[in-house]
Image (tube, rainbow, N blue to C red):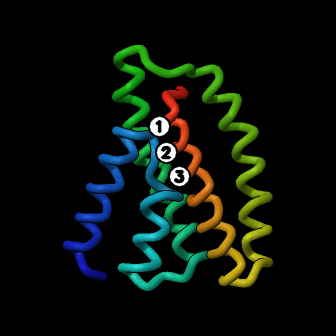
Amino acid sequence: MDVLGVVLVGLVAGMASGLLGIGGGVLFVPSLVIFFGESQLEAEATSLLVILPTAIAASVALRRRGIGDLPLALSLGVVGAAGAVAGALLALTLPADTLRLIFAALVAIVGFRMVRDAWSGAT
């Protein structure tokens, strides 16, 4: 694995995560597939492992400034963890191409919605 590539992807994704609240699904997964040759499933699994330290670091920085709803985050985290287990088990049953298409469709829909809302002035 190319150390420079890991550093670049890690820094860019980490900065985007802290700045925009994104990272794993939007940057790490495509980067791992395109630049590091991982399968979609391997990239998703690796991304999930990466999310933990990056999310903690950014969350601590924001919480020190009083930003974020900790009770809501903990509640969503507990329920989200259960959903993540179900999603991971489902991902194991899907063909790689199907998983990649689902991922691409989700990113496209989210991107379209964000651009549309930004242009219309919606928050």
16 vs 43, left or right, is left
Residue nearest the viewer, comparing 35 with 74: 35
Q: Which residue is drawn at 44% across and 19% down?
A: 67
Within the image, what quadrant is residue 28 found in? bottom left
Labels 2 & 3 near each other (Cβ < 8 A): yes
Residue type pointed to by label 3: Gly
Residue nearest the viewer, comparing 120 with 83: 120
Q: Which residue is drawn at 48% across and 58% down?
A: 26
Against 62, is 115 above or below?
below
Residue type pointed to by label 1: Trp
Q: Pointer 1: residues within 10 angstroms few (<14), some, or many (20+)?
A: few
- Of circles 2 and 3, the one toward us is 2
89 vs 101, left or right, is right
* Outermost residue toward the left in this view: 4
The x and y percentages for residue 116 are 54, 42
The x and y percentages for residue 81 are 70, 46
Labels 1 & 2 near each other (Cβ < 8 A): yes
Residue underneath mark 2: 115
Residue underneath mark 1: 119
Within the image, what quadrant is residue 2 found in? bottom left
Q: Disc 1 versus disc 3: distance between alpha carbons?
A: 12 Å
Residue underneath mark 3: 111
- Of circles 1 and 3, the one toward us is 1
Q: Disc 2 versus disc 3: distance between alpha carbons?
A: 6 Å
Residue nearest the viewer, comparing 16 with 65: 16
